[in-house]
């Protein structure tokens, strides 16, 4: 388990390619989503499943590393 938000995008993509489960913290720590892939035309945009919204399959979140 990685408890900080400093994973490089390339590592997240590698883990997804390996079939690893990726749960991401979004909305400034107030919500979690299941990362299921990324947009091939915009590789820094993650595809997520989010049970907190009616339309959950394929929601997009731009990758942003907080510093």
Image (spheres, rainbow, N blue to C red):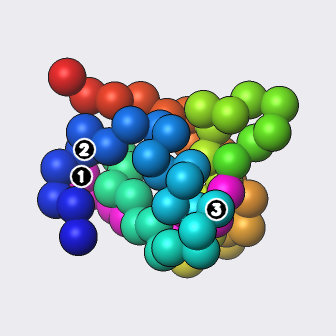
Question: Element at badge 2?
Answer: loop
- Residue drawn at x 33%, y 56% as measured from the top left: 25
Any part of residue 33 in sight:
no
Estimate how packed mark 2 is, as few (under 14), some (14 to 19) or many (20 or more) residues with alpha carbons within 10 Å: few
User: In the image, residue 33 lies at what x, y percent?
Assistant: 47, 65
Any part of residue 57 in sight:
yes
Q: Residue furthest right?
A: 41
Residue beneath label 2, please?
Answer: 5
- Residue drawn at x 23%, y 70% as measured from the top left: 1
Q: Which residues are drawn in magenta?
A: 29-37
Q: In the figure, is residue 57 to the left or right of 11? A: right
Q: State yes or no: residue 34 in magenta.
A: yes
Give the CA separation, mark 2 to mark 1: 10 Å
Which callout, 1 or 3, points at the residue further toward the start of the chain?
Answer: 3
Estimate how packed mark 3 is, as few (under 14), some (14 to 19) or many (20 or more) residues with alpha carbons within 10 Å: few
Residue beneath label 3, please?
Answer: 17
- Residue drawn at x 63%, y 37% as measured from the top left: 45
Give the CA separation, mark 3 to mark 2: 20 Å
User: In the image, residue 16 lies at what x, y percent?
Assistant: 58, 62
Which callout, 3 or 2, points at the residue further toward the start of the chain?
Answer: 2
Q: State yes or no: residue 12 in magenta.
A: no
Tag 1 and tag 3, C-beta contact below 8 Å: no
Which callout, 2 or 1, points at the residue further toward the start of the chain?
Answer: 2
From the image, which quarter does the C terminus lie in? top left
From the viewer's perspective, is residue 32 above or below residue 4? below
Q: Main secondary structure of the magenta part?
A: strand
Question: Element at badge 3?
Answer: helix
């Amino acid at each position: 388990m990685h408890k900080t938000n400093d994973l490089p995008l390339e590592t997240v993509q590698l883990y997804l390619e390996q079939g690893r489960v990726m749960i991401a913290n979004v909305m400034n720590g107030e919500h979690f989503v299941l990362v299921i892939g990324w947009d091939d035309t915009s590789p820094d945009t993650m595809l997520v499943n989010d049970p907190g919204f009616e339309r959950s399959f394929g929601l997009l979140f731009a990758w942003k590393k907080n510093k």
